Amino acid sequence: MYTVSVVIPCYQDEQVLKRLLIQLCALKNPPLEVIVVDGAHQENCRELCGTYGASWLPAVPCRGRQLQVGAAKARGAVLWFLHADACLPADPLSALRLALVQGALGGYFRFSFNLTGNWSARLLEKAIAWRCRMGVPYGDQGIFVRRESYFLAGGHGPWPLFEEVPLVHNLRKLGRFRSLPEPLLIDPRRWQRDGWWRRTWQNRKLALGYMCGVSPDKLARRYLSAKK
């Protein structure tokens, strides 16, 4: 059975992180280890990790660099990268391990909002599924990869946004990178706060900027200024 190291970048996300750590502890086939990489260096985050048996690592507040730090410390044969606000399906590790047994070097879960009865959410889920087939799944879809393949592909970009793009492109050149039918439930709070279509348009503008060569650091500053 493949041993799995979970790597979670965190920045003042203790409330949702607690929920995720509880879910990871409850899995019937648990991961080898859970590594939380804290960009805010919060003592309460460190204490929370201790409560639920996770390792706590401080790092600079940059998601790509945080993921690199966690991957470098991980001991598992497989690296599974989760955002702190992810909500897990019933048995994600069995689905993950089955994909690897069948020859994949990595993959990602289906994007699904943790919400029912909202037509905007359902429509966006379909659009994101199409985007993933044509382009790149993002980090909130629980990207997983064999450890050796991760480093062979060059790992995450050292950026605050779009850090998974070079990794996914390089993994697809190396072998099978699979889409799993199992959902990883996404917290809809940012879409609800900003408006479903306004938030989606803002995300697309950032992606278009990245495709046109704008640096991820500059795009991150735009993203933060738009939130104020």
Image (cartoon, rainbow, N blue to C red):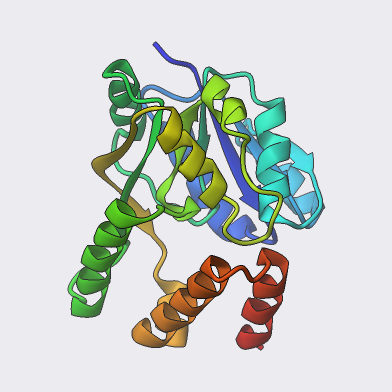
Q: Relative to 22, say whether 223 is above or below.
A: below
Whole-percent x, y for residue 220 in the image: 67, 71
In the image: residue 217, left or right of residue 227:
right
Q: Residue 76 falls in which quadrant of the image?
A: top right
Whole-percent x, y for residue 43 in the image: 81, 50
Q: Relative to 51, say whether 152 is above or below.
A: above
Q: Residue 216 falls in which quadrant of the image?
A: bottom right
In the image: residue 226, left or right of residue 138:
right
At 37% from the left and 45% from the top, the residue drawn is 88
At 64% from the left and 71% from the top, the residue drawn is 214
Question: Which quarter of the rendered picture does the C terminus lie within?
Answer: bottom right
Q: Give the residue furthest to the top.
A: 1
Q: Residue 36 falls in which quadrant of the image?
A: top right
Q: Is residue 50 visible?
A: no
Q: Relative to 24, say whether 11 is above or below.
A: below
* Most foreground residue, 183 or 139: 139
Instruction: Report the number of discs.
Output: 0
Question: Which quarter of the rendered picture does the N terminus lie within?
Answer: top left
Whole-percent x, y for residue 15 in the image: 58, 59
At 66% from the left and 81% from the top, the residue drawn is 222
* Most foreground residue, 38 or 215: 215
In the image: residue 150, left or right of residue 175:
right
* Most foreground residue, 199 or 46: 199
Whole-percent x, y for residue 128 in the image: 30, 63
Q: Is residue 8 visible?
A: yes
